[in-house]
Image (spheres, grey):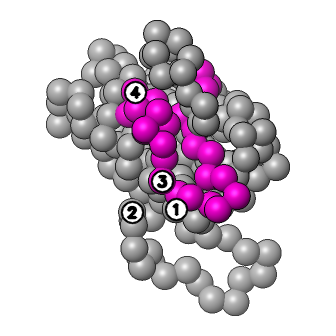
Amino acid sequence: MAEILVLYYSRGGSVAALARQVARGIGEVEGMSARLRTVPPVAPVTTNAAPPVPEDGAPYVEARDLAECAGLLLGSPTRFGNMAAPLKHFIDGLGSDWASGTLVGKPAAVFTSTATMHGGQESTLLTMMLPLLHHGCVIAGIPFTEPGLSATRSGGTPYGASHVAGGDNDPTPSDEESKLARALGRRIAGLAARLG
């Protein structure tokens, strides 16, 4: 069974919840399964190393996860219209994978969560695509043939799945956001199955 890597950073739980919906969509494609992974947090001054295994949630990503995946979905909360520092830090360390072409030809997509409707979802999704393009990934989004994309009143964009946590920081995706996240997972898994 081929695996799609769902790699994310989540601080408040919203992106992790969206990642689980993406993974459900991947699992709906015959012969495909999701491999959920996260990245460790970073800080400007490190006094203690991050534990080798997170206390809960997905395990930390390893180099073999990138090499073994048939496709990649990358998720991050929005930080001023861009991905969060821990995910960017991880991506910035992938020089050897870039040089060896680890991700070349693999389908990829992105997802995010913001506190507000106009918190930078689309710019975050677009900027997350740039390193994936440099790595030679085949980028896909959510086409408007998905009915929920035209009906959503919260998250969901053609650039990728998204969630609006709101002022109460609700980590639970709405029904529409969940459906669109699953659709994105199915899309990448379906592309990986055809390209494989």
Q: Which residue is mark 3?
A: 172
Q: Amino acid at mark 1?
A: Gly
Check if mark 1's residue and mark 3's residue have beta carbons within 8 Å. Answer: no
Q: Which residue is mark 4?
A: 183
Q: Which residue is mark 1?
A: 13
Position of the N terminus, as image quadrant, is: top left
- Secondary-structure class at tag 4: helix
Residue 178 part of the magenta segment: yes
Mark 2 and mark 4: Cα distance apart in space: 21 Å
- Between circles 2 and 4, the one closer to the viewer is 4
Q: Which residue is mark 2?
A: 58
Q: Amino acid at mark 4?
A: Ala
Q: Amino acid at mark 3?
A: Thr
Check if mark 3's residue and mark 2's residue have beta carbons within 8 Å. Answer: no
In the rendered image of this protein, does residue 101 appear above or below residue 171?
A: above
- Between circles 3 and 2, the one closer to the viewer is 3
Mark 4 and mark 3: Cα distance apart in space: 17 Å
